[in-house]
Amino acid sequence: MSALATAVALLAAASALSASPRLWERVRRGFARRPAPAVVAGTRSTTSTEGATGAVRSTQTAELFLPADALEQIWSPEHLERLARTYWRFLSRVTLGLLHVHYTERERSVVLLLPALKLLTFDAPEYEVDPQRGLVRWRIARGLLVARRGRDGGGYLQIEVLRLPSTDPGRAHLRVEVEVANFYPSIAHRLSRSIYDATQSRIHVIVTHAFLRSLRRLDLAESRVGRLRRHG
């Protein structure tokens, strides 16, 4: 069995696991252990394919409402870096360790069980932050799930946080969007679009929606790298 076929088989298993009502009940109960300081509402998702090239764009968006003073405490480059780490931590937890992230100085790789099964490898993240917007972007480099055309071809995964007007001065209003753009899936290219939709695309949408809902806890993981951590 080829490495790609192995990855597809394991992704199919992960898809079934991610869709399990019992698993999601465990996740929901874990989230409910303590009161959440924020409220998540208005989750949306869109996925489209560029007909001429086969490039995929997928976005998942949520509205987040939280105390204004809590937002001021975490609106910083350091906490944007922690949000990035929170995404990877959630990915590992929700797939029960099937997926995890391997860090190097220049890259981040999403690994499926075995180190050799690097499904997606990204360049080290880029960060942008100002008083109204924060963004972290990982550019797609290569991986078993990336068709040859998409390697170092301008594709990316990013998380963007926007501050929106609020009618309540004591409450802050955010829009959080996770976007994958200009992505060329090798599963669709080598096998079929329907298999891609049933495995990788399905997992991504399910996990990302769950990640966005989890942000209501404001439980941001400590960065593995700490490049933007404040000292002193």
Image (cartoon, rainbow, N blue to C red):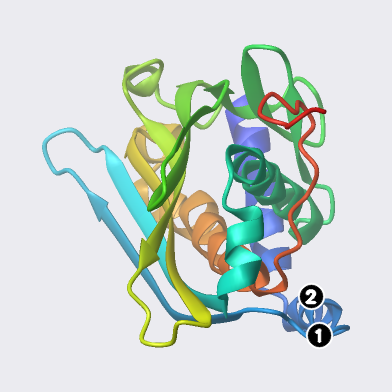
User: Percent position (x, y) of residue 231?
Assistant: 79, 28
Residues at circles 2 and 1 in contact by the CB criterion of under 8 Å: no
Indicate the amino acid at tag 1.
Ala
User: Percent position (x, y) of residue 226?
Assistant: 75, 28
Q: Residue at x 76, y 37 (%)?
A: 223
**Res. 5 in view:** yes
Quadrant for the N terminus in the image: top right
Q: Residue at x 62, y 70 (%)?
A: 69
Residue behind mark 2: 27
Q: Residue at x 40, y 25 (%)?
A: 147
Indicate the amino acid at tag 2.
Val
Q: Secondary structure at mark 2?
A: helix
Residue behind mark 1: 32
Q: Find the residue positioned furthest to the top.
A: 106
User: Percent position (x, y) of residue 37?
Assistant: 70, 79
Compared with 200, 149 (above or below) is above
Q: Residues within 10 Å of mark 1 (few under 14, many from 20)?
A: few
Q: Residues within 10 Å of mark 2 (few under 14, many from 20)?
A: some
Separation (CA) of disc 2 from disc 1? 9 Å
Left or right: residue 30 versus residue 218 is right
Left or right: residue 32 versus residue 128 is right
**Res. 143 in view:** no
Q: Secondary structure at mark 1?
A: loop
Compared with 227, 162 (above or below) is below
